[in-house]
């Protein structure tokens, strides 16, 4: 699933080609991909792009287009024939089209006036100025669950998915099954730093492509070349050279170094 860095690559990469374009409606080619009334956006112009967690927000004069790529979605800007597996098509008056391309058909698109209808439940943005070390310590105070499911909880922190969680916890030397209320103050501070560090580094490399993700201009994300632990089962840990282990945590495939990330 595209995570925060992959969606952010669309936010930054699509701003220049999209801002100022006028919309000429659209339609859902797969009925479950959107139940919105696309006639509402006819005549609207794109005034900016934002992101909340894993949601891309395209701001119009009076409305917002919100896109969630889910597992295998990507966004293509095309002229002429639309790509195979297009589930939602947004038309522009200049003849171009924005297509949600998703062969598994999990991606969703909404047209709303109030973005909180869709993203109001999402937790704090990990790169925002509000996400301070003190704020993070307070967020963890009454949490008793395991660390990896907590990081994946979009109502806790927005935008972290499976590969980011594994890389963050490895860098912090925290076992994914470690209970949140057992972390020391020092561990909380380091984890806060590592959350921001890993996300920023992934953004720098355009995110990660494992299967279908292509960023703006069809480019693959290159952060996969920087991964230390995720999907490295059996390979030597870069920290201690012991084999990386794959376990299941909260029904999610998880990769750890049992030497570096001890369950205490």
Image: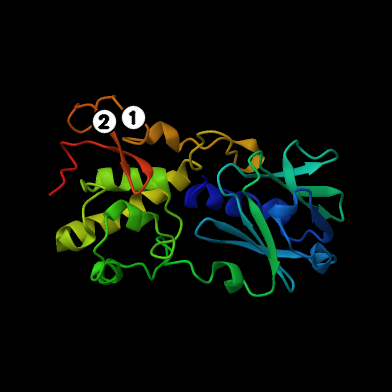
Residue found 43% across the figure and 44% down from its top: 202
Left or right: 201 in relation to 186: right
**Which residue is denoted by mark 2 in the rendering?**
244
Q: Quadrant of residue 166?
A: top left
Q: Nearer the viewer, residue 36 or 46?
A: 36
> Dot 1 surroundings within 10 Å: few (below 14), some, or many (20 or more)?
some
Earlier along the polypeptide chain: callout 1 or callout 2? Answer: 1
Residue 199 location in percent, x, y?
40, 50
Residue found 37% across the figure and 45% down from its top: 251
In contact (CB < 8 Å): disc 1 and disc 2 = yes
Above or below, 55 relative to 122? above
Left or right: 83 in relation to 71: right
What is the tally of numbered marks visible in this picture?
A: 2
| Residue at disc 1, secondary structure | loop
Q: Nearer the viewer, residue 229 or 48?
A: 229
Residue 114 location in percent, x, y?
64, 75
**Which residue is denoted by mark 1 in the rendering?**
232
Q: Quadrant of residue 105?
A: top right
Left or right: 97 in relation to 201: right
Q: Nearer the viewer, residue 36 or 115?
A: 36
Above or below, 80 relative to 177? above
Rounded to the nearest angstrom, the CA distance separating label 1 from label 2 is 6 Å
**Residue at the outermost left position:** 264
Residue 231 location in percent, x, y?
37, 32
Q: Nearer the viewer, residue 139 or 172?
A: 139
Above or below, 231 relative to 201? above
Residue found 27% across the figure and 60% down from its top: 145
């Amino acid at each position: 699933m595209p995570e925060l860095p992959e969606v952010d690559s669309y936010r930054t990469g699509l701003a220049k080609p999209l801002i100022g374009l006028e919309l000429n409606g659209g339609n859902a080619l797969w009925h479950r991909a959107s139940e919105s009334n696309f006639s509402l956006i006819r005549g609207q112009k794109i005034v900016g792009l934002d992101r909340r967690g894993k949601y891309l927000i395209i701001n119009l004069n009076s409305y917002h287009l919100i896109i969630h790529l889910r597992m295998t979605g990507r966004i293509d800007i095309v002229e002429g024939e639309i790509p195979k597996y297009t589930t939602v098509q947004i038309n522009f008056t200049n003849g171009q089209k924005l297509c949600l391309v998703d062969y598994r058909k999990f991606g969703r698109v909404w047209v709303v006036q109030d973005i909180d209808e869709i993203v109001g439940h999402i937790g704090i943005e990990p790169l925002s100025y509000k996400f301070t070390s003190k704020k993070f310590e307070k967020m963890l105070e009454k949490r008793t669950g395991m660390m990896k499911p907590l990081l994946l909880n979009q109502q806790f922190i927005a935008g972290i998915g499976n590969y980011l969680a594994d890389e963050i916890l490895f860098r912090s030397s925290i076992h994914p099954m470690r209970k949140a209320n057992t972390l020391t103050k020092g561990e909380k501070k380091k984890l806060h730093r590592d959350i921001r560090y890993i996300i920023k580094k992934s953004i720098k490399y355009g995110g990660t492509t494992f299967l279908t993700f292509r960023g703006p201009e069809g480019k693959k994300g290159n952060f996969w070349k920087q991964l230390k632990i995720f999907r490295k089962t059996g390979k030597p840990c870069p920290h201690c050279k012991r084999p990386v282990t794959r376990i299941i945590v909260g029904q999610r495939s998880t990769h750890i170094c049992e030497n570096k990330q001890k369950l205490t």
